Image (cartoon, rainbow, N blue to C red):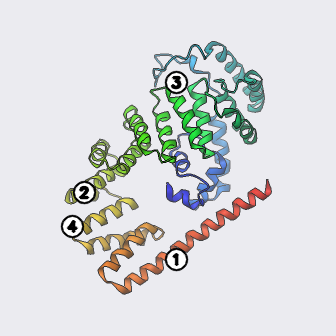
Amino acid sequence: MRAVAGRTAGVVSHSTVHQTLSGRRIPRWGALELIVEALGGDPMEFHPLWKQLRVQARQVPVGSASKSVQSPGYRFKLAMTRHTPQAGNLLILERTRQIKGADGPLAAARYLEKKIGASWNSPLVATYIQLLEEAGQEGKVAEIVPHFRGIEMRSAEASNVVAEIFDELEEYAEAARHGRAALRQDPNNARYAWLLGTYLESMDMLDEALVYYELAHRLKPKDYDFVESYLDSLLEKSQFAKAEEVARTCWEQESLRVYAGISLALQGNFLEAESVLTSISKLASNGVRALAQVRVALDRREDALALLAGHLEKSPNDLNSGAMYAELLRDAGSTEKYSEALRRLEAGIARENERVAAVMAKIRAAKQGQ
């Protein structure tokens, strides 16, 4: 995720890349466009798909008052009865739905704007923002953002929507504040816990981020994004045995099994780590590098070099693996091969620099056109 974020010249944060690729919510077009370009895609091919998805997915909710205990996925929530007039909001949202069906999302948003008035902490704000985005009124959303600073929203949904807006603005402290409010109001929401962890991680508050990643994983232990973030956080905090334990609960997912191999290696169990890593049918780049390091630790440097050489034939733009390969060649005294590896590495870095320069030029041109 950090590598993709780097290809956008740092304009898009790694947490936004993660959230975009996880598919857990519809991203804003500006971030998605840069991510598509960073991955070598054509933004003009993706833009109509993105617009179609927004129209389909941005449905006006009936409101939390309509949920029943028998409904699938029901979560026990702390009732905010003193602050949330659910009955009145339910009627307003139903009228909003009718207006949207008859006259479109912009008309529905204007109706809601009158109902919200100056009460920017209203639970109706979540639906209002969604309607504005559906109507292509991102500029209007930007105008109302200052109203959300320093206040607490009166519903978990509104708190979460506002938190995600501040995250995209890279105002992580404000995002975390609203994220905490969302989780207080809906304590069993795994996604809110996970998002709060990403905001805290963006501020390098790793200890607290780990707490919320663990909560998200506990609430939904089979969710790929939640367990991956939890595992990354455990490794970052050097909790290798715990990371191995968690990774073994997701053994059927090969992309997560690699964490078990890495955790074993970090505990010095190199033979078992090699066994785990070689049991994975298709190793990603991080798995290849981990296996190469394990083989070096087992004094099988030639095997490590052969592994990296084969990987780089298929993935020549993997600069991290290229750097490891060059370093091993240098240590082995293979002067000619080392020089060639350095040349390939320099060419790869030059390609990345060109990509970053193109992204920055596009950003400058967009700003001049505003």
Which percent across, then down, holds residue 258? 33, 53
Q: Dot 3, how many residues are within 10 Å of its Cα: few (below 14), some (14-19), or many (20+)? A: many
Residue 71 at x, y percent in the picture: 48, 20
For the residue pair 47 and 351, the one nearer the viewer reads as 351
Label of residue 298 in the image: 4
- Image vertical order of residue 258 relative to residue 165, above or below: below
Image mark for residue 185: 3
- Helix, strand or loop at label 1? It is helix
Closer to the chain start, of discs 3 and 1, is 3
Query: Mark 4–mark 3 contact, CB under 8 Å?
Result: no
Label 2 CA crowd tier, 10 Å (few <14, some 14–19, many 20+): many
The answer for how far apart the CA atoms under marks 2 and 3 are is 42 Å
- Where disc 4 sits, the SS reads loop
Instruction: Identify which amino acid the numbered label 2 is placed on.
Output: Ala
Task: Write down the residue under mark 1.
Answer: 347
User: Residue 295, position in %: x, y?
Assistant: 25, 67
Looking at the rendered structure, the kind of residue marked 4 is Leu
Q: Can you tell which quarter of the image residue 318 is in?
A: bottom left
Report which residue position mark 2 lands on: 273
Q: Is residue 62 left or right of residue 203?
A: right
Mark 4 and mark 2 lie on one chain; the one further toward the N terminus is 2
Amino acid at circle 1: Ala
SS category of the residue bearing label 3: helix
Q: Nearer the viewer, mark 4 or mark 3?
A: 3
Give amino acid for label 3. Gln
Q: Mark 2 or 1 closer to N-term?
A: 2
